Amino acid sequence: MYTVKYSILSYYPDIYLKSNMAVGTAFQIESDYYLENMMYVIDKKSKLVSFDDEIEDLEIINFFLEGVENEFLTYNGSIENYTKKFVNNFKFEQVETKIFSTISEAKEFVEKTYKYILHLGLEKKRRLKDNDRRHYVQSYLKSKYDKIYLRKVVNGSNILDKMTSDFLGVKDGKQYLYKFINNSKASIHNARSYILYASENDVNLILILEDDMAEVKEFLSYLSKKYDANISLIYENELLLS
């Protein structure tokens, strides 16, 4: 058996606030006679400036991230001990664990996971395709629900009131609808309709946002409270930690 432990390296503009951006992912694969560290960081460092306009020197950040990557690749201790020393603006999130039967399965998980987590920070040629991202999320959600459906149409209290979920999870008889929301005007406009649907039909709706959507998240949170809707707003990376 092969154990994969991994942690997301996040950048926090303000260490006292929750808003953050994933800039790297560290993995440690271990078995009885096997140990390998793997580290991936974003290609598009300029996205950090869009996320935090107070950043003045990307060269320093690039140098820092390269240092973290090189240091972890040669680190002989546990990933838990390595990640806990980062406590300021760059901080590793909680270490997660997955177990696989073969090394090929473990490395396939690493490949898909870092590409999912760092999606918008990677060059387009390195990103997962949209269908691959959805199948990745679907495989993750399978462990959380009794049943999981892809692109399921759900009827509201009025037969004309319908919503197509990206994912529909069923657990203990309750339904949980998932929708991806990006930063486009059309997607944000649609999110308003989803919130109204959730309010009128009393459903559990989870809206999955891209990393750089703090203002949109605040706006959608306001709408969900206004319409008394049962909405959860999470970033794509948080989905893997929920």
Image (tube, helix red, strand yellow):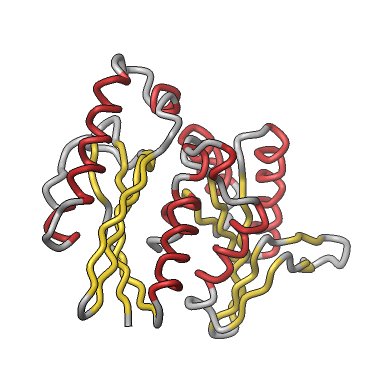
Expressed as whole percent of the image width and height from the top left, the position of residue 102 reads 40, 79
Residue 115 picture location, percent across and down = 49, 51
Q: Can residue 217 be seen in this view?
A: yes
Q: Describe residue 163's horizontal placement relative to residue 176 as left or right.
A: right
The vertical placement of 64 against 138, above or below, is above
Q: Which of 125 and 183 is in front in this view?
A: 125
- 61 shown above or below 40: above
| Camera sees residue 234 | no
Q: Quadrant of the C terminus?
A: bottom left
Residue positioned 26% across, 35% down in the render: 66
Image point (45%, 23%), residue name: 50
Closest to the observer, 47 or 110: 110
Task: Name the outermost residue toward the top.
Answer: 56
Q: In this view, does 14 lie to the left or right of 127?
A: left
- Drawn side of residue 191 relative to residue 164, left or right: left
Figure quadrant of residue 59: top left
**Residue most extreme to the right:** 160
186 to 103, vertically: above or below = above
Point 67% across, 57% down: residue: 131
Q: Position of residue 112 (x, y in %)?
A: 49, 58
Above or below 12: residue 181: below
Residue 47 x, y percent position in the rendering: 45, 28
In the picture, the quarter occupied by the N terminus is bottom left
Residue positioned 30% across, 37% down in the render:
11
Camera-side residue of 181 and 136:
136
Residue 91 occupies which quadrant of the picture?
top left
